[in-house]
Image (cartoon, rainbow, N blue to C red):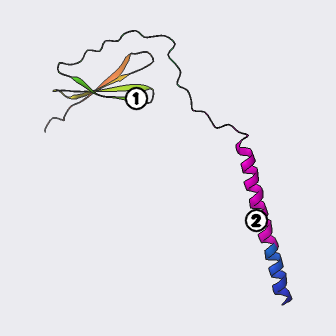
């Protein structure tokens, strides 16, 4: 009987110590929340100068179907009677960095 009483006393002490540590942990987390400011999102650098007017020659009958921002590039999807074209631009400089022509594969 003495062993059971001792075991209950030890387990009760461990339980109370665990609850005390939990309360202490919650308290320290709650007091630190106001101390650190939330991380700020990276600001996109503003263009320092205007790149003027950029003229892009489109194929006959082509129209702009979609414009997407992809990372630090601007992708323009052209549709129309011919194959689908993707034009890639650098929005800071306004220059075309490349293009893709999505044409069906030739039958073998």
What secondary structure is the stretch in magenta mostly built from?
Answer: helix
Residue 68, quarter of picture: top left
Residue at point 52% right, 25% down?
A: 44
Residue 87's x, y, as percent?
A: 31, 24
Residue 65's x, y, as percent?
A: 26, 28
Q: Which residues are magenta?
A: 13-42
Residue 14, quarter of picture: bottom right
Secondary element at tag 1? strand
Asked if the magenta segment contains residue 96, the reply would be no
Q: Decide: is 38 above or below 45.
A: below
Q: Residue furthest top?
A: 52
Q: Quadrant of the N terminus?
A: bottom right
Q: Earlier in the sequence, mark 1 or mark 2?
A: 2
Of 38 and 83, nearer the camera is 38
Residue at point 18% right, 35% down?
A: 105
Residue at point 80% right, 75% down?
A: 12
Label 1 – label 2 distance at C-alpha: 51 Å
Number of residues whose C-alpha sits closer than 10 Å to that of mark 1, classed few (under 14), some (14–19) or many (20 or more): few
**Left/right of residue 45 with respect to residue 29 in the rendered view:** left
Query: Which residue is tagged 1?
Result: 69
Q: Which mark is residue 2?
A: none
Residue at point 20% right, 29% down?
A: 83
Residue 34's x, y, as percent?
A: 71, 41
Number of residues whose C-alpha sits closer than 10 Å to that of mark 2, classed few (under 14), some (14–19) or many (20 or more): few
Query: Which residue is tagged 2?
Result: 19
């Amino acid at each position: 009987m003495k062993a059971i009483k001792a075991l209950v006393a030890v387990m009760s002490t461990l339980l109370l110590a665990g609850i005390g540590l939990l309360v202490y942990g919650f308290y320290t987390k709650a007091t630190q929340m106001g101390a650190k400011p939330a991380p700020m999102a990276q600001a996109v650098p503003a263009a320092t100068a205007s790149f003027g007017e950029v003229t892009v020659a489109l194929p006959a009958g082509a129209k702009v179907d979609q414009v997407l921002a992809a990372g630090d590039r601007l992708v323009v999807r052209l549709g129309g009677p011919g194959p689908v074209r993707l034009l890639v631009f650098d929005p800071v400089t306004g220059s075309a960095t490349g293009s893709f022509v999505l044409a069906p594969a030739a039958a073998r």
